[in-house]
Image: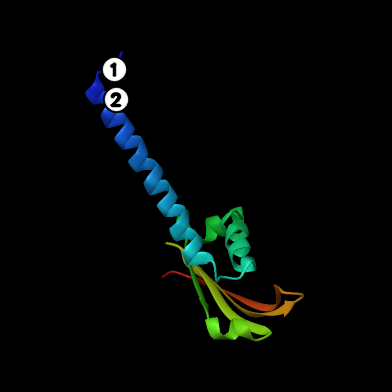
């Protein structure tokens, strides 16, 4: 049904696609391996909130700031923000380590509309 050339192209294309897919998964793991899990969960939860989507816009971009050296201690100050075309949401807080897991303790939220 397929000529040998088409089979070869499909085989090489499929192998290249699998290689790129695996490379993207490794890169994603490498970028997020040191990030505390609660920050990733926070982004997933906030991105699905319909009230925030209407206030920020559809394509809100996340930004995350924390000091990696603070992760060696038992408290971690962080700043998490979502910036959309209609405004910006910024959450500043800190988390403490309890039984090896980071738990957010206090946070302040600020919404700033875009002029």
Quarter residue 52 falls in: bottom right
Tell me where residue 10 appears, x and y as whole percent.
31, 30
How far apart are the two marked residues, 1 and 2, measured between alpha carbons? Answer: 6 Å
**Label drawn at residue 7:** 2
Label 2: few (<14), some (14–19) or many (≥20) C-alpha neighbours in 10 Å = few
Note whether residue 67 is visible: no
Q: Which residue lies furthest to the right in this view?
A: 99
| Residue depicted at x 69% and y 85% | 74
From the top left corner, tell me how far across and down residue 106 is, in percent: 70, 79
Residue in view at x 59 percent, y 85 percent: 70
Q: Are marks 1 and 2 in contact (CB under 8 Å)?
A: yes
- From the image, tell me which residue sits under label 1: 2
Which numbered disc flags the more N-terminal residue, 1 or 2? 1
Confirm whether residue 5 shows in the render: yes
Q: Position of residue 5 (x, y in %)?
A: 22, 25
Number of labels in the image equals 2
Work out which residue is located at the far top of the displayed protein and give it: 1
Query: Horizontal placement of 2 versus 56: left or right?
Result: left
**Helix, strand or loop under label 1:** loop
């Amino acid at each position: 049904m397929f000529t040998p050339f088409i089979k070869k192209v499909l085989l090489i294309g499929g192998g290249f696609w699998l290689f790129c897919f695996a490379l993207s998964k490794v890169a994603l793991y490498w970028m997020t391996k040191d990030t505390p899990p609660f920050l990733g969960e926070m982004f997933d939860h906030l991105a699905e909130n319909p009230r925030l989507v209407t206030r920020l816009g559809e394509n809100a971009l996340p930004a995350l700031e924390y000091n990696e050296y603070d992760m060696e201690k038992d408290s971690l100050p962080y700043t998490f923000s979502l910036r959309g075309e209609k405004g910006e949401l910024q959450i500043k807080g800190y988390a403490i380590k309890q039984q090896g897991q980071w738990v957010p303790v206090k946070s302040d939220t600020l919404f700033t509309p875009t002029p």
